[in-house]
Image: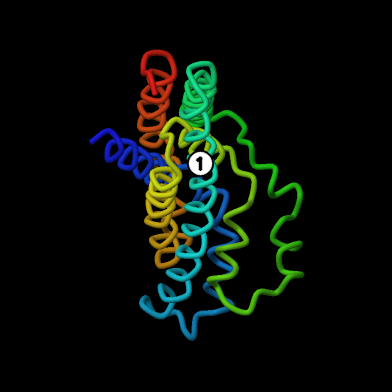
Amino acid sequence: MESLGLIFSHFLVGFAGGFGHCILMCHPFVLHISSTFADSNSGYKILIPNFFYNAGRTITYAGLGAVAGGLGSIATYAGQNFLNIQKFAALVGGIILVLFAAMYFFNLSSFNFLAKLKIMNKIKKFKPNNPFFYGLLLGFLPCGLSMGAIIATVPSGSWYTGALMMAAFGVGTAVALMILAILGSYIMKYVKYFKHITAILLFIMGIYFIYQGIIFSY
């Protein structure tokens, strides 16, 4: 039951962060996928390449979650001293989520350094020939929200639980990005409202992970 709770909590983090963070950070990628790989502007034809794009992202997230959860399992078998690593990871992951919540709630400047680095232009040089490979590649982008979620999988102490947690996170973010693919600029008008809801949910999830880091034994 605890594993199911962790998986569901990661879905909620992805779902909440998707509307307040991913829409702002990733809308250039979504628009590029839609314009490059969709046959037309009709709803289902736009959704098809974006489905594969998000599937690629989710698989990458699951792989990263498996690695993080595997590191947690090593700590579990290594003994009590190494269990502190798991607790520390939960604490750090929770703090990152709380910081993101504060950023959205108080409208602080984001960690959007990807725009400054012109990541989209650099990725285009690789020219993946389908949206699935774009997703696999973009899943590795350094993002504070995803890094917080990955760190928070370490306390699971299991590679497959970590993989499922990050897969759930990926599915959660995909909801917002798929809606963005269909509604485009229309949904961008309402991002400021989503940001406040996101702040509340991320704060709750962050406190949950911090609580795990301080109280729970793994």
Name the residue located 36 percent from the left edge and 35 percent from the top edge. 197
Q: In which quarter of the image is residue 186?
A: bottom left
Question: Disc count in the image?
Answer: 1
Relative image position of residue 193 (x, y in whole percent): 39, 40
| Residue 159 placement: quadrant | top left
Residue that carries the numbered disc 1 in the rendered image: 70
Image quarter hosting the C terminus:
top left
* Front one among 113 and 81: 81
Q: Element at badge 1?
A: helix
Is residue 106 at all visible to an observer of this figure? no
Residue farthest toward the top in the current orientation of the protein: 215
Where residue 87 appears, as percent x and y from the top left, is 47, 21
Q: What's the residue at 60%, 60% (across, down)?
A: 28
Q: Is residue 185 above or below residue 98?
A: below
> 165 or 75: nearer the eye?
75
Residue 29 figure quarter: bottom right
Pointer 1 local density, CA inside 10 Å: few below 14, some 14–19, many at least 20: many
Side (left or right) of 92 relative to 155: right
Outermost residue to the left = 1
Quarter of the figure that contains the N terminus: top left
Q: Which residue is drawn at 61% across and 58% down?
A: 138
The structure residue drawn at horizontal position 60% and vertical position 67%, both measured from the top left corner, is 134
Residue flagged by tag 1: what amino acid is it? Gly
Q: Which colour scheme is used?
A: rainbow
Q: Which residue lies furthest to the bottom in this view?
A: 39
